[in-house]
Amino acid sequence: MNAEHPSGERQLQEQMGTSERAQNFYKHHLHDQLTERMSEMIQRQEMVFIATSDAQGNCDCSPRFGPPGFVHMVDSRTLAYPEFRGNGVYASLGNILENPHIGMVFVDFFDSTVGLHINGEAQSCSPEELPPQISSTLKLTPEEQSRVIERWVVINIEEAYIHCSKHIPQLQKVAKPIQWGTDDPKAKSSSFFNEYDLV
């Protein structure tokens, strides 16, 4: 982690009188690479929230889903996740082309109710363009192997830190059939927010 934290953070910490508390957080909870427990958590997750922005700072936040461990650990400072066929908009990937900064949030809703923030720089590439040192580490699950992976996103980790569990609800997972890659509007609930389709 860079010694300098964003000036907006420091300004508000001083204004709100939390500078000492913030420094304690940085000292004890902020890491520049994944710890063993962070790695174990990532390997169990089936969902991650991805935050990106374009060159002008216009933001997008989007979830990604897959079988447990679909976000792959290349090493303690590098992650990679597959971009499966979607709606064809490429909002996140388009932002990464303009601005490599990325934020990721994993939330363990079903067990510890702890979250994990990861910030870093990302690049996307086709499966054929993946560097050998990365592609050789990927152990794809049958679900991933059976789906069309359009691109990979590789993240160089700059900081990783906890999101404490006190406000995270504990949820119960129930069975739901997943139709990976389907274009069936009913299966996708495509018209859920279209008022004209609800009349």
Image (cartoon, rainbow, N blue to C red):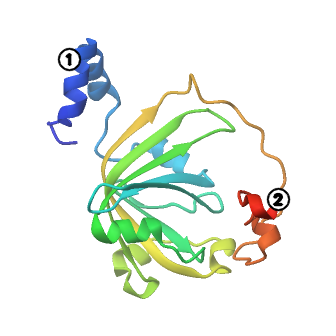
Q: CA distance from mark 1 to mark 2?
A: 50 Å
User: In the picture, residue 4 is in which quadrant?
Assistant: top left
Residue 74 appears left or right of 173: left
Figure quadrant of the N terminus:
top left
- Residue at point 35%, 30% (across, down): 29
Figure quadrant of the C terminus:
bottom right
User: In the picture, residue 96 is in which quadrant?
Assistant: bottom left
Amino acid type shown at disc 2: Leu
Label located before the other in sequence (1 or 2): 1
Question: Compared to 154, does 132 lie above or below?
Answer: below
Q: Residues within 10 Å of mark 1 (few under 14, many from 20)?
A: few
SS of the residue at dot 2? Answer: loop
* Contact? badges 1 and 2 (CB < 8 Å): no
Q: Number of marks in the image?
A: 2
- Where is residue 109? Give x, y as percent: 65, 38
> Between residues 15 and 36, which one lies in front from this camera angle?
15
Amino acid type shown at disc 1: Glu
User: In the picture, residue 184 is in which quadrant?
Assistant: bottom right
- Residue at point 20%, 17% (across, down): 14
- Residue farthest to the top? 17
Question: Compared to 86, does 25 lie above or below?
Answer: above
> Between residues 7 and 3, which one lies in front from this camera angle?
7
Disc 2 target residue: 198
Q: Residues within 10 Å of mark 2 (few under 14, many from 20)?
A: few
SS of the residue at dot 1? Answer: helix
- Residue at point 58%, 73% (across, down): 140
Q: Which mark is residue 158?
A: none
- Residue at point 32%, 62% (across, down): 54
- Residue farthest to the left? 4
- Where is residue 143? Give x, y as percent: 69, 72
Disc 1 target residue: 14
Question: Compared to 158, does 8 lie above or below?
Answer: above
